[in-house]
């Protein structure tokens, strides 16, 4: 279980709390249902027969496609709720803005955002510098990269300069490793040292003659190298981290320079271009600030992360790195399985099982009175509404005809909010009269964000850029549609698993609403279900957005983990003697 949760976190940037909550709810539901081997086999059938249909034909109606390039305000709308479970309210707002600014400056062109997010997620350790002792408000974004070392030799240079990377000492050794060096006298030994010194000087002079002004080394260089570097005007930064060397190689396209080959005096072609190279004081630490010219779409910038102590900065950095991983998932798609495609293609459009149906008006009034006019709502009422919803679905299948898909299609309302660009009021809706509904402002261009009805017949289960408002919308919608399609299952065990998973999904929004006012989740659930049944907009939410891909992967990862756990037939306990702990053992030994 731990390995599966860690794997999911590493792949999607999602935390382990939702994974554990959903896993516990599913296991508890299966145990209450009997937990037989048949249910274990039904889990895989549930994923293909019910879950994917619920997503492709039901949930798809409600999500929106983020515009290409992810505008900065949209990034903030995705980042702030993501950081809410990891940081305080004041911290997450500031860090979300910094993170969005860093993305924008690293990728000024919209088409470069996916690549920039990949680099930021993979190289964030080298793309940020922590400064303890300063408030978070002092954090900023600087052009170029900040190296964590000070100059071993600093020779100021104006204008554009060239740099080389080295991964070995420039002072040649007396002999190769593993080879014995024999001298007959002290004079012979001193002559050998003088030869090495002359060769080192010649090498540094050769760097100067090739217009190299900056030497970046992952190893510590000998004092004689530093001496001649100062003499010939070459700045030296040594003992660089492997992450920093890898980042420089990636954005400049250069490989480390190997000085000792067949011809030491050959022309140096593997050089990186930098627009500036200067000392930088971060708190009490001296660093090197370099502005490299990038050979790719990624434009290097560095986040200066300030905090009261190192521990806070480490927490913030870890949260941001996972946030970049999460943002990368926004560009991914989930393809439908071949068997689901075949079933979808063979069905007649008019008899599509996911068509919306009108519901009896008398029952609508009853539900509306329960969900909107009652001051206190109990779990019993919630269960009663769930049972009533299932009955309505079956009744409507028999007595109602499908409503025009275009009218019932759930979409985000687009409204022009200023003269410079088009802003969108992001909310879920399935009807008219939305201009009075509360919503949050998120930047969408009308021509880019509108998702065609043709997506219903796409080969992708989840399109790239699909988002939903945060706050339990995904879980409640998927809960609703799983119950819908579970009623069409011929296998009773699949139907049981469907109901277990549908109920377990509600455990996540229940946990979210636990800290709010009493019965807040129950009221929200009733309003949402009532709105779905009446083809009306779901309750508005201005808290932000979340990736549909990440939420779906959470469900799939939990289901796979449950399948693995249910495959265990027997657990054997093993007793072993308690290990004796010596006084000299450290905490790391435990």
Image: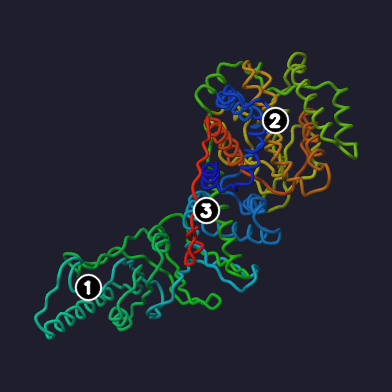
**Residue 359 in picture, x, y percent from top left:** 80, 22
Measuring from the top left, give residue 31's x and y in whole percent. Answer: 65, 30
User: Which residue is the site of mark 2?
Assistant: 409
User: Between 79 and 406, which is closer to the camera in this rendering?
Assistant: 79
Residue 554's x, y, as percent? 59, 39
Point out the image quarter for the N terminus: top right
Task: Look at discs 2 and 1 and give the one toward the viewer.
Answer: 1
* Residue 172 tag number: 1
Q: Is residue 348 above or below residue 67?
A: above
Q: CA distance from mark 2 to mark 1?
A: 72 Å
Task: Report which residue position mark 3 lands on.
Answer: 109
Q: Secondary structure at mark 3?
A: loop
Q: CA distance from mark 2 to mark 3?
A: 32 Å
Whole-percent x, y for residue 212 in the image: 32, 72
Tag 3 near tag 1, CB within 8 Å: no
Q: Quadrant of residue 525?
A: top right
Viewer-nearest residue: 105 or 519: 519
Using a 10 Å C-alpha cutoff, classify the residue at mark 3 as few (fewer than 14 neighbours), some (14 to 19) or many (20 or more).
few
Q: Are marks 2 and 3 in contact (CB under 8 Å)?
A: no
Decide: is 455 above or below 492. Answer: below
The CA span between labels 3 and 1 is: 46 Å
Neighbourhood count class around disc 1 (C-alpha, 10 Å): few under 14, some 14–19, many 20 upward: some
Earlier residue among tags 3 and 1: 3
Check the image and tell me how it is coloured.
rainbow
Please tell me which residue lies in front, 588 or 457.
588
Is residue 237 toward the left or the right of residue 395 in the image?
Answer: left
In front of the other: label 2 or label 3? 2
């Amino acid at each position: 279980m731990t390995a599966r949760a860690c794997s999911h976190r590493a792949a999607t940037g999602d935390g382990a709390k939702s994974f554990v909550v959903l896993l516990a709810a599913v296991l508890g539901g299966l145990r209450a249902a009997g937990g037989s081997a048949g249910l274990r086999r039904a889990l895989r059938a549930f994923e293909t027969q019910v879950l994917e249909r619920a997503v492709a034909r039901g949930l798809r109606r409600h999500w929106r496609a983020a515009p290409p390039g992810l505008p900065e305000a949209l990034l903030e709308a995705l980042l702030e709720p993501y950081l809410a479970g990891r940081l305080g309210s004041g911290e997450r707002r500031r860090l979300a803005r910094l993170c969005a600014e860093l993305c924008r400056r690293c990728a000024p062109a919209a088409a470069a955002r996916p690549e920039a997010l990949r680099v930021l997620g993979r190289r964030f350790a080298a793309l940020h510098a922590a400064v303890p002792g300063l408030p978070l408000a002092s954090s900023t974004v600087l052009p170029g990269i900040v190296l964590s070392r000070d100059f071993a030799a600093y020779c100021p240079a104006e204008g554009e300069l060239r740099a080389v990377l080295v991964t070995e000492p420039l002072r040649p050794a007396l002999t190769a490793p593993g080879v014995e060096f024999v001298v007959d006298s002290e004079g012979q030994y001193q002559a050998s040292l003088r030869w090495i010194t002359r060769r080192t000087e010649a090498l540094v002079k050769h760097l100067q003659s090739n217009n190299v002004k900056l030497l970046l080394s992952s190893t510590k260089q000998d004092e004689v190298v530093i001496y001649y570097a100062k003499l010939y005007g070459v700045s030296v930064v040594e003992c660089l981290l492997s992450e920093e060397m890898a980042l420089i190689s990636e954005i400049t396209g250069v490989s480390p320079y190997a000085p000792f080959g067949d011809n030491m005096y050959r022309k140096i072609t593997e050089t990186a271009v930098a627009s500036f190279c200067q000392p930088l004081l971060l708190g009490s630490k001296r660093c090197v600030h370099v502005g490299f010219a990038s050979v790719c779409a990624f434009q290097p910038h560095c986040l200066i992360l300030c905090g009261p102590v190192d521990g806070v900065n480490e927490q913030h950095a870890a949260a941001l790195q996972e946030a970049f991983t999460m943002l990368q998932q926004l560009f991914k798609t989930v393809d439908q399985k071949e068997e689901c495609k075949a079933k979808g293609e063979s069905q007649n459009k008019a008899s599509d099982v996911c068509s919306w149906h009108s519901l009896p008006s008398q029952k609508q009034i009853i539900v509306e009175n329960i969900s909107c006019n009652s001051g206190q709502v109990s779990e019993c009422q919630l269960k009663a509404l769930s049972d009533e919803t299932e009955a309505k679905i079956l009744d409507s299948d028999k007595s109602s005809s499908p409503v025009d898909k275009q009218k019932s299609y759930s979409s985000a309302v687009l409204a022009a909010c200023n003269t410079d660009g088009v802003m969108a009021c992001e909310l879920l809706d399935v009807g008219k009269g939305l201009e009075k509904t509360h919503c949050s402002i998120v930047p969408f261009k009308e021509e880019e964000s509108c998702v065609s009805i043709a997506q219903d017949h796409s080969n992708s289960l989840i399109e790239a850029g699909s988002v939903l408002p945060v706050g339990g919308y995904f879980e409640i919608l998927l809960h609703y549609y799983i119950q819908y399609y579970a009623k069409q299952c011929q296998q009773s065990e699949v139907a049981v698993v469907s109901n277990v998973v549908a109920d377990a999904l509600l455990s996540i929004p229940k946990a979210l609403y636990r800290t709010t006012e009493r019965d807040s989740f129950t009221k929200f659930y009733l309003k949402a279900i009532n709105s779905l049944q009446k083809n009306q907009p779901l309750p508005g939410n201005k808290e932000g957005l979340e990736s549909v891909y990440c939420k779906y992967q959470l469900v799939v990862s939990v289901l796979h983990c449950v399948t693995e756990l249910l495959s265990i037939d027997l657990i054997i306990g093993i007793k072993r003697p308690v290990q004796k702990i010596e006084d000299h053992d450290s905490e790391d030994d435990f």
